[in-house]
Amino acid sequence: MTCAGAWAAVTRPLWRLHTSARRPLSVFGRKLGARCCSSGMTLDTINPATVDRIIRVDHAGEYGANRFYAGQMAVLGQTSVGPIIQKMWDQEKEHLKKFSELMVALRVRPTALMPFWNVIGFALGAGTGLLGKEGVMACTVAVEESVSHHYNNQIRALMEEGPVKHKELL
């Protein structure tokens, strides 16, 4: 399974949250309910600790990736590889947006390491940018392979907890 496929498999059902759900949440002083529209799965039918951990970790990863591409664009944005990096960065921005929405909707706190990911992500991106196009692409491939492994581990953890319990996430 590809990185994108694993990520989509884990998060797609959670993206489509409605305000008519069965479990009220408070977001900015408003009551908000969350119900996944794909099958009527509610927050009561999933393990909150597992979902919190997955959303928090994946949000941090998407935030780090966003900063990584910002660093690459700072170095290579005006070169021939700039449009390729921009396209990858735009995809990461969309992923980050979705995870940010999930964090609010599911009331998941962000990682305490956000300042770290801000600085380190940018520095790693700029550092790989200094290696040129080949360095950027080699690093991107290595990171995507690692992310794919990470998502596969998340899927395995959900399977161990119970494939029936998490069928919508799987």
Image (cartoon, rainbow, N blue to C red):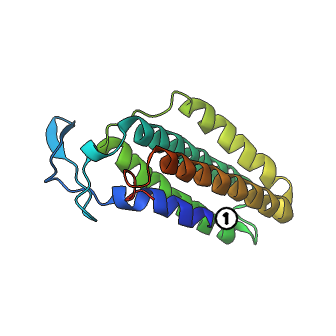
Looking at the image, is 15 positioned above or below residue 109?
A: below
Quadrant where the N terminus is found in the figure:
bottom right
Residue 136 place in picture, x, y as percent: 78, 59
Q: Would you call the spot at circle 1 few (<14 residues within 10 Å), some (14-19), or many (20 or more)?
A: many
Going 82% across and 60% down the picture, which residue do you hit? 138
Looking at the image, is 43 positioned above or below residue 108?
A: below
Looking at the image, is 56 positioned above or below residue 112?
A: below
Judging depth in this view, the residue of 134 and 40 nearest the camera is 40
Looking at the image, is 7 positioned above or below residue 104?
A: below
Instruction: Quadrant for residue 46, please give it.
Output: top left
- Please indicate whether residue 96 sits to the left or right of residue 127 in the image: left
Residue 94 seen from this side: no
- Please indicate whether residue 163 sits to the left or right of residue 25 in the image: right
> What residue did someone put label 1 on?
85
- Please indicate whether residue 161 sits to the left or right of residue 33 in the image: right
Going 44% across and 48% down the picture, which residue do you hit? 162
Q: How many marks?
A: 1
Looking at the rendered structure, the kind of residue marked 1 is Ile
Residue 87 place in picture, x, y as percent: 60, 69
Judging depth in this view, the residue of 63 and 126 nearest the camera is 63
Judging depth in this view, the residue of 83 and 141 nearest the camera is 141
Quadrant where the C terminus is found in the figure:
bottom left
